[in-house]
Amino acid sequence: EQINKGRYKHYMEKEIHEQPESLKTTMRGRLIRGGFHKAKSVLLGGLKDHLKTIRRSRRIVFIGCGTSYNAALAARPILEELSGVPVTLEIASDLLDRQGPIYREDTAVFVSQSGETADTLHALQYALENGALCVGITNTVGSAIARNTHCGIHINAGCEIGVASTKAYTSQIVVMAMMALAIGDDTISSLSRREAIIDGLFDLPNKVKEVLPKLDQEMKDLAKQLMAEQSLLVFGRGYNYATALEGALKVKEVALMHSEGILAGEMKHGPLALVDENLSILVIATHDACFSKQQSVIQQLHARKGRLIVMCSKGEAPLVCPGVSVRVIEVPQVEDCLQPVINIIPLQLLSYHLTVLRGYNVDQPRNLAKSVTTQ
Ligand code: G6P
């Protein structure tokens, strides 16, 4: 049944709409509700015997390619916050090109939907040779990465067929948020923060379910407006820098439209030069600690006459650019570290509808493969 398109025209469409269910299966049996005298917690069977080693490691290095790398980028802030261990990220091919340092005292985490990506697999070999504790986060039980790591977490998002990763991405973020919760489990001072995130995780599938039909229609309309564009810039920062990169990657890889994810804090160091009345720019400005900085970015982009589309938290449209009417995409607000799971959904839908309207192959974009098994 999973490998059938059901009532959908394309696998990508089906996989986007499956996310309420795939997020549930990713979390199934792993969140503990707690109760009287017992805190809410997370149980990750594949990791529990290694948590002490991970907490004591010199740093945690996340390694992946494409969308899997972006998922690690989305989870980094919460991993840093809850683990208290420095967290770094590596694109697998770049780590190999540089033969970058990996130490015995490192925990190296390999993130891969397929578990078979050649660069990630070679990086795993390299980290094993260097004596690091190697953890696998994959969606494919029995894959090369799952077999060759010391321990790991299965993503359990179900089979993903569309070349562009969608439901695996949101489940990867959830897996890494649960990993952060498990590593930070021995810290009393973060207990209320961790409980709030666990409550947020319980709620997340419903939030996604609620918002999918509305966003689907809205993104179809927005795709009509944008279908003939040459380019789309996506601005994000903080928890949603990854959303900007991943949203732009989707638009580029399936809709075959030039798109770039931009760290909003870097706007004045180059990207601003591109902005004029012919450039479409999507700014992610949902409510978190970076909100006021994003308001200022929006004002500056507006002053340069950029054609703005702003993603904001429900009810906050009047705050994004006071006194000016810009096109907005409203999304429900969730716990800040889980917001990237919600925010990527409109961008997945937008890239899907753009692709259909532009007449390109949704599930098998030209020149790309689902699993890149050669270097
Ligand atoms: C290919 C796929 C992407 C994926 C990347 C990494 O480029 O088209 O969707 O993100 O490989 O794959 P992995 O299986 O390691 O997550």
Image: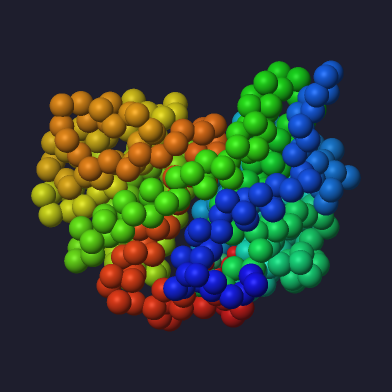
Picture quarter with the C terminus: bottom right
What percent of the width, then of the height, locates residue 143? 74, 71
**Colour convention of the picture:** rainbow
Q: Quadrant of residue 95?
A: bottom right
Picture quarter with the N terminus: bottom right
Asked whether 252 or 334 is in front, the reply is 334
Q: Residue at x 20, y 26 (%)?
A: 322
Q: How many marks?
A: 0
Residue 110 visible, this angle:
no
What percent of the width, then of the height, locates residue 31? 75, 39
Q: Residue at x 56, y 59 (%)?
A: 18
Asked whether 53 or 177 is in front, the reply is 177
**Rendered position, 196 above or below 325:** above
- The extreme front residue here reads 7
Q: Quadrant of residue 203?
A: top right
Asked whether 64 or 371 is in front, the reply is 371
**Rendered position, 149 above or below 242:** below
Left or right of 66 on screen, residue 312: left
**Rendered position, 351 above or below 340:** below
- The extreme right residue here reads 49
Residue 43 visible, this angle:
yes
Q: Residue at x 50, y 70 (%)?
A: 7
Q: Residue at x 35, y 58 (%)?
A: 350
What percent of the width, then of the height, locates residue 171? 61, 52
What percent of the width, then of the height, locates residue 242? 47, 48
Q: Quadrant of ligand 1?
A: bottom right
